[in-house]
């Protein structure tokens, strides 16, 4: 059995805290320490988890084999490039970067250093999505909806980069590649200076059309994905990790049914309970050990960012929304 991977976490705010607490409890990893630009926060988290708060990220990188990075999006490029320059494998929280120039620099730096770069698109590890993979067959239409109550965290970026990018990444994944022909979108900055609600319609060269809505000013949380294809559709509740496949019954002919259940059979998706972040970290550690490839590569993170920024551009073309400037 291979020894645990010596891990570090850079940035231990609301999300980085969860990275650190999982790594501290995982037998596949040894949490060597953490770094945060706020020394008092780093010391607090280190005491909670029984690890070390390093004074600089350089000291942390020197002591670890790999790191996860959960800093604000505006500094993803700076921090990621510093880590990759040491040859350390990096798990970068989504979005990969704030700009395409920074995303390209990160992907190139990883290749130049021979370092693995994984992007934290956590919904790829959602139990409902994982259970649905075997039923996906050339989607024709995908409908995504992600609504969340307002909270100040995350408003440093438009809702397209904060929330919608989750669905955009899933759609690219299910579509089998970029191949985007057209993007139409609208939205509004309602509470924050940046986009708070957005809707996008994306057309692919395969004929697939996707419709996605995201809002961070909703009264309740909703995370749904529906995938329509010939002879059935998948209904996934990403919030609960549950889903079902409604499959066309064999031998059905028009005129023989009065209700949907006469036409389709319901196939519940087997979705054993699992923590998506823990699964993501387990996948990263397996990739660090050379047991598999990164499950969400830097190139895939780049593609999701590119589509998200394209949606933001399409909104600005029709709505007077302030531009995002990291």
Image (tube, rainbow, N blue to C red):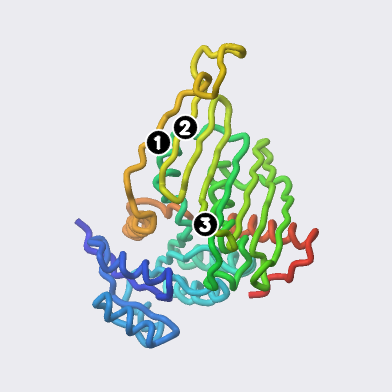
- Does residue 199 appear left or right of residue 276 in this picture? right
Identify the mark at residue 269; answer none if there is no mark: 1
Q: Secondary structure at mark 3?
A: loop
The location of residue 211, given as percent across then percent down, is 65, 45
Q: Secondary structure at mark 1?
A: loop
The location of residue 11, given as percent across then percent down, is 43, 76
**Does label 2 or label 3 sit earlier along the sequence?**
3
Identify the mark at residue 307; answer none if there is no mark: none
Report the residue at 72% width, 70% height from top.
323
Cα distance in 3D space between marks 2 and 1: 7 Å
Report the residue at 69% width, 43% height from top.
203
Above or below 58: residue 272: above
The location of residue 98, given as percent across then percent down, is 60, 69
Along the viewing direction, whichever of 265 and 94 lies nearer the viewer: 265
Label 3 neighbourhood size at 10 Å, few (<14), some (14-19), many (20+)? few
Q: Which residue is mark 2?
A: 245
- Does residue 98 appear left or right of residue 25 in this picture? right
Q: Quadrant of residue 300?
A: bottom right
Cα distance in 3D space between marks 2 and 3: 25 Å
Residue 279 visible? The answer is yes
Report the residue at 44% width, 70% height from top.
69
Q: Quadrant of residue 104?
A: bottom right
Label 3 or label 1, whichever lies nearer to me, is 3
Above or below 248: residue 109: below
Q: Which residue is mark 3?
A: 220
Q: Quadrant of the N terminus?
A: bottom left
Along the viewing direction, whichever of 6 and 109 lies nearer the viewer: 6
Q: Are marks 2 and 1 in contact (CB under 8 Å)?
A: yes
**Does label 3 or label 1 sit earlier along the sequence?**
3
């Amino acid at each position: 059995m291979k020894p645990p991977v010596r891990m570090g976490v850079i940035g231990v705010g609301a999300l980085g805290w969860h990275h650190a607490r999982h790594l501290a409890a995982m037998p596949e990893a040894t949490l060597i320490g953490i770094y945060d630009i706020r020394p008092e926060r780093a010391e607090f988290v280190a005491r909670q988890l029984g690890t070390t708060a390093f004074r600089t990220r350089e000291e942390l990188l020197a002591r670890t084999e790999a790191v996860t990075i959960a800093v604000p999006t505006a500094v993803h490029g700076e921090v990621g490039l510093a880590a990759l320059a040491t040859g350390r494998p990096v798990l970068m929280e989504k979005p990969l970067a704030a700009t395409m120039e920074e995303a390209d620099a990160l992907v190139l730096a990883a290749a130049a250093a021979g370092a693995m770069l994984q992007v934290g698109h956590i919904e790829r590890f959602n139990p409902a999505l994982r259970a649905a993979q075997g039923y996906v067959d050339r989607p024709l239409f995908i409908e995504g909806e992600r609504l969340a109550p307002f909270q100040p965290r995350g408003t440093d970026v438009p809702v397209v980069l904060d929330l919608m990018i989750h669905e955009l990444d899933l759609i690219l994944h299910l579509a089998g590649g970029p191949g985007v022909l057209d993007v139409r979108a609208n939205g509004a900055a309602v509470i924050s200076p940046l986009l708070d609600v957005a809707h996008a319609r994306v057309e692919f060269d395969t004929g697939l059309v996707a419709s996605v809505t995201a809002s961070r000013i909703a009264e309740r949380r909703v995370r749904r994905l529906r995938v329509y294809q010939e002879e059935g559709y998948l209904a996934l509740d990403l919030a609960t990790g549950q889903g079902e496949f409604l499959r066309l019954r064999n031998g059905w002919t028009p005129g023989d049914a009065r209700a949907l259940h006469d036409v389709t059979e319901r196939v519940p998706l087997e979705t054993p309970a699992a923590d998506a972040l823990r699964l993501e970290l387990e996948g990263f550690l397996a990739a660090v050990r050379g047991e598999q490839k990164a499950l969400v590569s830097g190139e895939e993170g780049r593609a999701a960012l590119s589509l998200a920024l394209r949606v933001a551009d399409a909104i600005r073309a029709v709505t007077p929304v302030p531009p995002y400037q990291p």
